[in-house]
Image (cartoon, grey):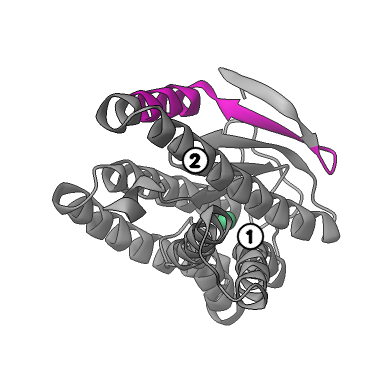
Amino acid sequence: MRSSIRLGSLLGIPIYLHFTFLLLLGVLSLSRLFSAGVAAAVGSLILISSVFGLVVLHELGHAMAARAFGIRTHDVTLLPIGGVARLERMPEEPRQEFWIALAGPAVNLAIAGLLAVWLVGTGGGAGVGASFAARLLSINLALVTFNLLPAFPMDGGRVLRAVLAKRMGSLRATEIAATVGKGMALLFFVGGLLLNPMLILIAFFVWVGAKQELMIARSRAWSGGARGISYPDQPRPGVVTVWRYPQDDQR
Ligand code: ZN
C-alpha cells in the first residue's frame, strides 16, 4: 500500500503503518502531553502501541487461517480505525470465509485467556504490571466483541454471510449481510454523533465496504459464478479489523 511505512514482516507477511495512523498517534500523544504531562503521554503511547500489536496479531490470525486454505496474504496495514489484511482473494467457499473471519477474534480471545490466567496466577495483585495486563485484557475482549458485530464486511458480518451462504447461495447471502452491515453503519453513525467521533469514520468505512462487497458478489454472479476469475478493477479484498482506542476506556 502506498503512503505506508514498512515495519518489517512477521510469518512472511509484510506489516505496514499507514501515515494517517502515525499522524493520529502523534496528535493523541501531544494532546496527552499538554493535558496530563510527559508520564501520561508516554503511558498512552505504550498502550496504543500495545493495541497496535494486538491488532497485528489479530490480522495474522486471519492470514494464517487463509494460508491453511491456500490463500496468500499480500500484507497487513495499520490504519487509524484498525487493521487490514489484504488477501490475494476472498475464499469462495462459505466454510473457508467462516473460519478465516473467526480466526482474528479467536487470537484476541486466546490472548485475553492467557492474560486472565496470568492475572489469576499472580493473585491479580496491584502494581503497574497487573493494571496494564488488566487493561490489555479488557481491550482484547473489546476487540473480540466489536469485531464480531454483524457489521459486514467486519468479521462478524463475514461470519453471518458465510452462514447464510450455505443456505441461500453467495449473492443472496451477500445482499442480506450488506443490508445488515449498512444498518449497523447507521447505528455507528448515530453512536458517533452521541459518543465518539471515531465511530463516524467506522460507519463510513463499513457502509462503503458493504457496497463494494455487494458489487463484487454481483459481478461474480453475472460472470456465471465462474471460479478463479480475478477482478483487476476491483479493490483488493481485505479482512478488516476495527479497533477501539484505549482512550475510550479512560472515560
Ligand atoms: Zn478481523
Residue under the image location 57 percent in, 45 percent down: 50
Dot label at residue 104: 1
For the view shown, which residue lies furthest in the left direction? 194
The nearer-to-camera label among 1 and 2 is 2
Q: Is residue 220 above or below residue 93?
A: above
Q: Is residue 12 magenta?
A: yes
Q: Nearer the viewer, residue 115 or 63?
A: 115
Q: Nearer the viewer, residue 243 or 223?
A: 243
Q: Nearer the viewer, residue 194 or 120?
A: 120
Residue under the image location 48 percent in, 58 percent down: 135
Q: Nearer the viewer, residue 202 or 209?
A: 202
Q: Which residue is mark 2?
A: 48
* Label 2 neighbour load within 10 Å: few <14, some 14-19, many 20+: some
Q: Quadrant of the N terminus?
A: top right
For the view shown, which residue lies furthest in the bottom direction? 167
x and y, in percent, of residue 167 in the image: 56, 82
